[in-house]
Amino acid sequence: MCGILGIVAQSPANQLLYDGLLMLQHRGQDASGIVTAQGNTFHMHKGCGLVRDVFRTRDMRALTGNMGIGHVRYPTAGSASSPAEAQPFYVNSPFGIVLGHNGNLTNASQLSEELFKADLRHVNTNSDSEVLLNVLAHELQASTQNYQLDPDAIFAAVSGVHKRCKGAYAAIAMIAGYGLLAFRDPYGIRPLVFGVIENELGNEYLVASESVALDTLGFKLIRDVKPGEAIFIDEAGNLYNKQCAPNHSLNPCIFEYVYLARPDSVIDGISVYETRLNMGEYLADKIKTSMRHLDIDVVIPIPDSSRPSALQLANQLGVNFREGFVKNRYVGRTFIMPGQQQRRKSVRQKLNAMSIEFRGKNVMLVDDSIVRGTTSREIVQMAREAGANKIYFASAAPPVRYPNVYGIDMPTRQELIATDRDNEEICREIGADDLIFQDSEALKQAVSKLSSSVKKFETSCFDGIYITGDVTSEYLHTIEQQRITDSPLSRARSNTQLDLSLVV
């Protein structure tokens, strides 16, 4: 669940990339990076931390050129603390390529072995994104017979990537001296959109994970990149596109609508904000039909992503809506923080309960989802301490019972509170008086009713159905064991062999 950005402009791209990454900061707070291209030369700066912490004025001045890509990282594979795994990644053969990736490759281990033994390429980190870059580089080398590159050869290389890579990947790459390439996996799991500004100097293009980046930078949204499609924009601003996967279908990750994306984004033609309103309506319908015994005095959202659902839920039930928690904006999203202890501590730092809205009331708390249960448990306890009489907890999403292997940090079943627990047991675990989960079909309907073109979704974390077809119980067991046995120290040591995070 990283944020990626690519720009082909008629003027310096560095400030546009910086501003765009700020709009995508919610998609990753672990590391940030920008690469610009000036002719055949790349200029790179990246590091661990937020965008505003990684980039100083001197760094921005060194990022010259009218074309570039940016990345904000949320660690789903490799190490969360290694600066060597900050993106974009770079290889110098063929042509010179930099790449930023959002998603997870499910066959990264197999590909790493193939790259070493067959392709004779070196992968320096544990990041599957570096694996994707080297696969792309090898396919580009195989698709051209000389030092000249054209769109047909580039699209042939992307077709080769689709044949070899499994899992989820939305990627943006720059090829030195040629232009910018963007492509999406054949299932369209992770989002990718592009837009244009038409001015007297020529067209300027922007590719991004979410449409909000286009809106804030003044670009007009053209459309989403289709599953399996590749888009190439050369240095002159000419745009080429081609479907590079013979078997493709649109299956966007439904968790983007539940939590990951900003509410002011539109993904695959569907407004994220409207889907969250619909989630609240379906929750209200469920309460009216099967939980009419609940005596609710007030509905209170857990800021911020659940606010639209909670508001619509309150309206449908005819119950007062109140803001009972004040959020500290300077604490990061606890969901994407590595480690349970850090998440637990950060909940209290992030949220403070106002006793005036809780004292003596039966409160319906609404959250976007319950994953590990850490946040939910702390919030229920805070509501108790604030004087709530009864606490009902509603989740706008179904219970998360299975790992997500496509770019969301849910890799082990032991960490998921809903694994091997029914609703009553989960309710006891978080300390609530009653618990309401969204039904899976209702969630799909809440999203799909806004667009007739999207009929299927990637919902593996709710139903355990992995659409790529290569995720087995043995695979899940392997990644779970890796997460349990790998120490942060050993991962860090494995990534200190070489650090190329330099301004060139």
Image: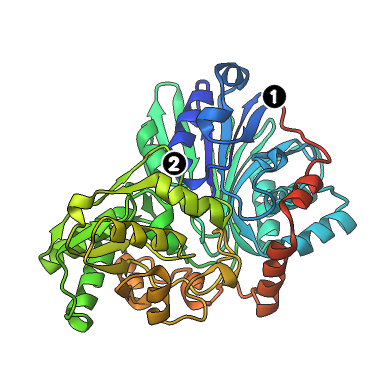
> How many residues crowd around disc 2 within 10 Å: few (fewer than 14), some, or many (20 or more)?
few
Residue 472: % across, % down = 66, 77
At a point 53% along the width and 42% down the height, the residue shown is 29
* Nearer the camera: disc 2 or disc 1: 2
Q: Taking 369 as reference, is 42 above or below it?
A: above
Q: How was this image coloured?
A: rainbow
> How many residues crowd around disc 1 within 10 Å: few (fewer than 14), some, or many (20 or more)?
few
Q: Taking 186 as reference, is 183 above or below it?
A: above
Q: Amino acid at mark 2?
A: Val
At a point 40% along the width and 38% down the height, the residue shown is 214
Q: Amino acid at mark 1?
A: Val
Q: Taking 180 as reference, is 160 above or below it?
A: below
Q: Is residue 229 visible?
A: no
Q: Cα distance, mark 2 to mark 1?
A: 30 Å
At a point 53% along the width and 77% down the height, the residue shown is 465
Local secondary structure at mark 1: loop
Q: Is residue 93 left or right of residue 467?
A: right
Local secondary structure at mark 2: loop
Residue 200: % across, % down = 40, 21
Residue ranking furthest to the left: 318
Of 403 and 340, the residue lying toward us: 340
Q: Is residue 397 left or right of residue 290?
A: right
Q: Check contact, mark 2 vs mark 1: CB within 8 A.
A: no
Q: Taking 241 as reference, is 15 above or below it?
A: above
Q: Which mark is residue 503?
A: 1
Q: Which mark is residue 152?
A: none
Report which residue position mark 2 lands on.
331
At a point 42% along the width and 44% down the height, the residue shown is 349
Of 392 and 119, the residue lying toward us: 392
Q: Is residue 437 left or right of residue 491?
A: left
Of 427 and 249, the residue lying toward us: 427
